[in-house]
Image (cartoon, grey):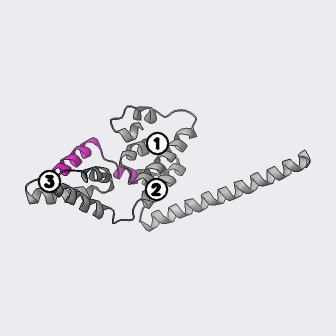
Amino acid sequence: MSARKLLAVTANVVLCVTFFCSRGAAAEVDFDEKLLSEAHIATDGPSLIDFFRKRTLADSDRQQLELFLRQLGDERFSVRENASRQLVALGSPALGALQRALLDADLEVVRRASACIDEIQRGPGASVPAAAVRLLARRRQPETLATLLGYIAFADDDMVEDEVLAALVAVAAANGKTDAALLAALDDPLPARRG
């Protein structure tokens, strides 16, 4: 085969791959937008940033979370009931701590933690935050990197965490220089952010 023919064949292959990859990416965007719309979540950049900020616990919220976890084993029924309600109200950001509580020596703590997890997970599951991560990475909002770094410690599950990591790589590599939020995360007290 001549060099000219080989070049023409290679160019056609590259065009076909590019065409099908771009169609696949467009289909994924359409699927993600549809999934979020069905969950009544706006898909514009600022709304997606707000979605993740609501799913990220501040330091004071984390301290409150730890208090509620301890109260799951309180001797007073009313305190245990209130702690269970508060943990469910925190939603998916409480899932990691509740999973750890399943290993507690107190059977009441384990039972209540399991019930809280079941109630929190009755929703649409991890598919909604995973779709929101992918869309946010494509929207390229200025706060995307900092928002996802804040959220990663509260990711719904390993799949969502993987999506966040992929988005962080894509967003961090986009402008060619290291973002200050990424450098600050290296000293964060939460292991998930440092990682």
Q: Nearer the viewer, mark 2 or mark 1?
A: 2
From the image, tell me which residue sits under label 2. Answer: 130
Distance from the alpha carbon under mark 1 to that under mark 3:
38 Å
Tag 1: amino acid: Leu
Q: Earlier in the sequence, mark 1 or mark 3?
A: 3
Distance from the alpha carbon under mark 2 to that under mark 1:
15 Å
From the image, tell me which residue sits under label 1. Answer: 145
Q: Quadrant for residue 16, please give it.
A: bottom right
Number of callouts in the render?
3
Tag 2: amino acid: Ala
Where is residue 96 shown, x and y percent of the image? 32, 50
Q: Nearer the viewer, mark 3 or mark 2?
A: 3
Distance from the alpha carbon under mark 3 to that under mark 2:
33 Å
Q: Residue furthest right?
A: 2
Magenta residues, start to end:
51-71
- Horizontal side of 179 relative to 13 (left or right) equals left
Where is residue 5 shown, x and y percent of the image? 89, 50
From this view, report whether residue 13 is shown above or below residue 33: above
From this view, report whether residue 5 is shown above or below residue 118: above
From this view, report whether residue 125 is shown above or below residue 67: below
Of 41 and 32, nearer the camera is 32
- Horizontal side of 131 relative to 97 (left or right) equals right
Q: Residue furthest bottom?
A: 38
Where is residue 49 shown, x and y percent of the image? 42, 50
Of 154 and 97, nearer the camera is 97
From the image, tell me which residue sits under label 3. Answer: 73
Q: Is residue 85 visible?
A: no
Q: State whether the magenta stretch is mostly helix, strand or loop.
A: helix
Tag 3: amino acid: Gly
